[in-house]
Image (cartoon, grey):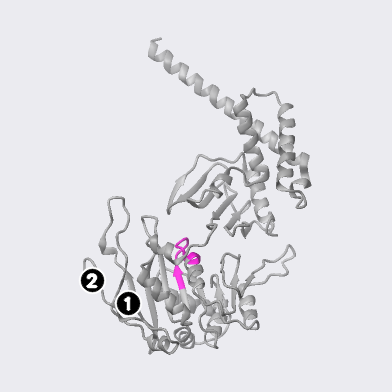
Amino acid sequence: MSLADRVKAAKAAEVTVEGHREEIVQELRRKLHYKVVEGLGPMLYDRQMSDAELKLRVMEMLEWALDQEESVPLARADRVALLQEIADDVLGYGPIDPYLSDPDITEVMVNGPHQVWVERAGRLSLSDTRFVDATHLERIIEKIVGQVGRRIDESTPMVDARLPDGSRVNAVIHPLAIGGPFLTIRKFSADPFTADQLVGMGAFTEQVAGFMRRCVYGRLNIIVSGGTGSGKTTLLNVLSSFIPDTDRIITVEDAAELRLNQMHVLSLEGRPANIEGQGQVTIRDLVRNTLRMRPDRIVVGEVRGGEALDMLQAMNTGHDGSLTTVHSNTPRDTLSRIETMVLMAGMELPVRAIREQVSSAVDLVVHLNRLRDGSRRVTQVTEVVGMEGDVITTQDLFLFDYGMGMDEDGMFKGRLKATGIRPSFSDRLTDFGINLPAELFAPEPFAGR
């Protein structure tokens, strides 16, 4: 055998030994994890025990359990690292704990126990993080949903919840998740984004920020539209921050995510059915109830069903200045979706009557897109003008200029530009003492046109 062949064989043997050792360590980790959970039991969920005391108990139990195992010798550094990993599993959210505390990561997607994806700056990447097995991942999911009073099991294999910091959680387990369980966490920043921060990130221009501030203050009804993960809730939070402190604001959400700093804010959150299928409180129930709570402003986290009819009714009966979000591809699609959702309410209404309600209620649609470069931008600001025959008429006030191309880093150089059209609600805002300067709508040339 040549020297090269001997070196290659030695390397192969080294890889085999290392792989075998890794399997043994993983098995040891699994054993220790189960021993701690079994040994401490209900103590892990004792809210009267401080975090420091609970961590001390866990580490003591781990040290004891590891001393009973002699299956694999561990160096001091490896021993400390292994104990810390298992403590994170038991006390926190396991292998994904570091990602949840990393401010640069905006989303964590667990596609089964052995595949974890993360999103940084709008781009996805596969991490080298793994769970021990499906049971380990299920235990972490149960811990997350249990903290907010939700449950997940074979009878309820799908759940929406939120972490204590407001991050949105979706989990799907067996039998619905083939190859799962699946866990998706959309993180929320510790401090909500401000309008100035979004301007700095290029989401929209300072000119458009000033325009939207005037529209909110002037009690226009605004819908934020866009696809999944385009930043609708973030923008809704920013728009809501423009509401004056003197207004009584009521927010309605499936899972409470909005964080408003005004003094007079009431937050309502929907509730799923219990194990007997009873006790569900829908967004529609909550929207109806807000009308009895003397709101100045109603902010609905997302309209996705029959509550669209109640929202339109509220907008058309003196509750001006309402805000909500809708999943859609364009502002025109937004209006079509609202029309469809009103029909889902089960009312036998003529299509023309629905469209008249929509055109009368909605003043402005602000549309977001998540672009190919990973950035989230406002790409259209569209006014709902009224009806022409059976058609709702709209006009674009600001459009994103895609024709400006991309820079050497693959980032879009475009920005929102005024189309030169002055909104028809200008006089209405003037009556409120709000002036829309003519320079806001000065037309700008679009590249490639």
State if disc 2 and disc 1 touch (CB < 8 Å). no
**Which label is found at residue 445?**
2
Q: Position of residue 220 (x, y in %)?
A: 46, 81
Real-space CA distance between mark 1 and mark 2, rounded to the nearest whole angstrom: 14 Å
Splitting the image into 4 quarters, where does residue 136 fall? top right
Front residue of 249/395: it is: 249
Can residue 332 be seen? Answer: no
Splitting the image into 4 quarters, where does residue 206 fall? bottom left
**Which label is found at residue 440?**
1
Q: Position of residue 239 (x, y in %)?
A: 48, 72
- Mark 2: which amino acid? Pro
- Mark 1: which amino acid? Leu
Numbered disc 2: secondary structure = loop
Residue at 56% from the left image edge and 69% from the top image edge: 260
Residue at 39% from the left image edge and 76% from the top image edge: 211
- The N terminus appears in which quarter of the rendering? top left
Residue 225 located within the stretch drawn in magenta: yes
**Which label is found at residue 4?**
none
Task: Tell me: residue 262, above or below residue 320.
Answer: above
The segment highlighted magenta reads 224-234
Task: Tell me: residue 118, above or below residue 223.
Answer: above
Sequence-earlier tag: 1 or 2: 1
Can residue 338 be seen? Answer: yes
Numbered disc 1: secondary structure = helix
